[in-house]
Each structure stands twice: as structure tokens, then as C-alpha cells.
Amino acid sequence: MNDSYTNKAGLAEKQDLFSSVYLSRNAKSHLTKLAAWINDRNIPFLITSIGMIILLLWAGSYKMTAPGAEGIVPLVSNSPLIWWHFKLFGPYIGADIIGLTEITAAILIIAGYLRPKAGIIGGLIASLMFFITSTMVITTPGAIISVPGIHGMRYMSFLGLFLFKDVISLGVSFYLISYFGQKAILSENQSQ
């Protein structure tokens, strides 16, 4: 059973490499050649992972300042999932905990370059955080506002758009889990 599993994993890895090489060699138009070139150089992973790392480090460290802590009070206080956080820890320690969690996720994603399972954990932490903050688009007063002069028309304010980036970041977090997961599976199967 174990040999069969190892053989299947080796075959899957070869098929992945084959499909990537196949796509690159068989791209005919300039557009598909460009897409293959981007795929071959792993550009989507590099941009999303580096972008996520910078976002988490920057946002996490900002939350550990007085203006950063005070800035998230209305967001956290109106969240149906973590409204209790500042009641339990207070705004400054509570914001420090959130900031440290973001920094920890970033460090684990960085570690994922060498140890893919660490990247999976970093992606899971980021997914949980961004899921929670994505709900704040709906619950934070002023995030969705009326259009002046048009009855019933609503749109996202600047605050709403700021929060909506977390929906996209949630998708990036799942992508990173998937990417590091594939690397971890290949690593596990190579060590058997």
C-alpha cells in the first residue's frame, strides 16, 4: 500500500511537471506564451506571498501603536465575532495581540519558503483573521452608505473599501495554503 501511494505521488509530481512543460511548449499565441512565461516563473505565488507578508508585517506593527490601536476600536467593537476582544484585553493590549498575530502569520509564511508546513499554518492564521475582518464590511457603521439623492442606492464608503480588501486577502490566504500544501505533500512523498 505504501509503495503504491509513493508511486502515485511520484507520478502526480511528474504529471505536474509535464503539464507545466507541456503548456509552455504548446503555447501558440503571444497571449498564451505570456501566460506560460508567467506560470513558469511562479510569478503569481511570488507576488501574492510577498504582498501578503508586507501587508501582515506593516498592519501588525501599526496596530501596536496608539493611533493603530485606537483606529481599530470601532471595527472590533462592532464585530459579531470578536466584539468581546477589547472588553477582555482593553484596546491597547487587544490591538497588540492582533498585531502580534499578524506578524506571526507573516513570519510563518516566510518560513514556508523553506518549510512548507509552516506556510500552511501562516496561511491558516491569515485565513481566520481575514474571515473575521471580512464580516466587518457588513457590521461596521459607515462602511456601506446611501448615495445622496438616490433613494435606496447604497455603496461602500472609503472605510468599506478599506475593509473589503480583507475579502481579497482571504482568497490570497487560501491560495497560499493550497500552494504550501502542494509543496508539503511533495516533500512528504519524497522523504518516503
Image (tube, helix red, strand yellow):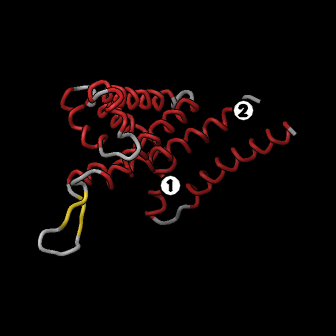
Depth-wise, is mark 2 or mark 1 nearer the camera? 2
* Residue type at numbered disc 2: Gln
Q: State the residue at coordinates (71%, 47%).
A: 12
Q: Compared with residue 114, is residue 151 higher up or lower down, i.e. above or below?
A: below
Which of the labelled discs sits on residue 36, or is there none?
1
Tell me the crowding category of disc 1: few under 14, some 14 to 19, or many 20 or more residues within 10 angstroms, Cα based: many
User: Looking at the image, is mark 2 or mark 1 earlier in the sequence?
Assistant: 1
The kind of secondary structure element at disc 2 is helix
Q: CA distance from mark 2 to mark 1?
A: 27 Å
Q: State the residue at coordinates (24%, 42%).
A: 74
* Residue type at numbered disc 1: Ala
> Which residue occupies the foreground of this view, 150 or 55?
150
**Is 73 positioned to the left or the right of 150 in the image?**
right
Location of residue 131 in the rendering, given as x and y in whole percent from the top left corner: 43, 46
Q: State the residue at coordinates (50%, 42%).
A: 176
Q: Compared with residue 179, is residue 32 higher up or lower down, i.e. above or below?
A: below
* Residue at the spot of label 2: 190
Q: Quadrant of the N terminus?
A: top right
Location of residue 28 in the rendering, given as x and y in whole percent from the top left corner: 52, 65
Q: Compared with residue 56, is residue 165 higher up or lower down, i.e. above or below?
A: below
Location of residue 167 in the rendering, given as x and y in whole percent from the top left corner: 39, 51
Quadrant in which residue 66 is drawn: top left
Location of residue 36 in the rendering, given as x and y in whole percent from the top left corner: 50, 55
Which of the labelled discs sits on residue 8, or is there none?
none
